[in-house]
Image (tube, rainbow, N blue to C red):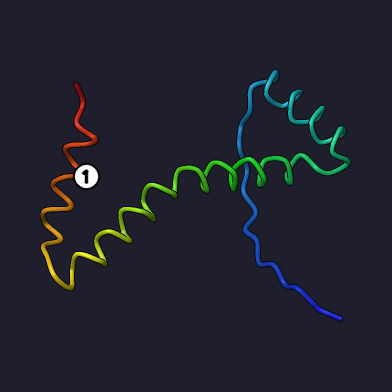
Amino acid sequence: MAVYIYIMKRTQIFLEEKVHKRLKIESRLRGTTVSEVIRDSLEARRGRDAEPLVQALGRLFGIVKGGSPEAEIRRLRVDRAVP
């Protein structure tokens, strides 16, 4: 039998009424809590946002052995330049 221990921090947020209603509906549909819906949404977003960073770090670590990390950082900055 496996035992999992999760350490969580309690926090408080303020939501607009319409957002809170949508979260309550979603939690009822899933059969879970509003907190779980929020955690799932945050994890899903973090996963999407983290992927470009993970790829960039992979390129940087590959460059360190035989090239310049500064060149990769400059390239990344150009990709993010505001038009």
Other residues around mark 1 within 10 Å, as few (<14) / some (14–19) / many (≥20): few
Q: Where is residue 64 in the image (x, y as percent from the top left)?
A: 18, 69
Q: Residue at 13% across / 47% down in the picture?
A: 74
Q: Quick check: 3 left or right of 40?
A: right
Q: What residue type is labelled 1?
A: Leu
When asked about the image quadrant of residue 34, the answer is top right
Seen from the viewer's position, the closer of residues 67 and 9 is 67
Q: Position of residue 62 (x, y in %)?
A: 25, 66
Q: Quick check: 54 left or right of 60?
A: right
Q: Residue at 66% across / 46% down in the picture?
A: 39
When asked about the image quadrant of residue 9, the answer is bottom right
Indicate whether 35 appears above or below 23. below
- Quadrant in which the N terminus appears: bottom right
For label 1, the SS is helix
Indicate whether 45 appears above or below 69. above
Q: Position of residue 45 (x, y in %)?
A: 54, 41
When asked about the image quadrant of residue 68, the answer is bottom left
Q: Given the current orientation, which residue lies at the most extreme front position?
A: 66
Residue ID for mark 1:
76
Q: Position of residue 58 (x, y in %)?
A: 33, 61
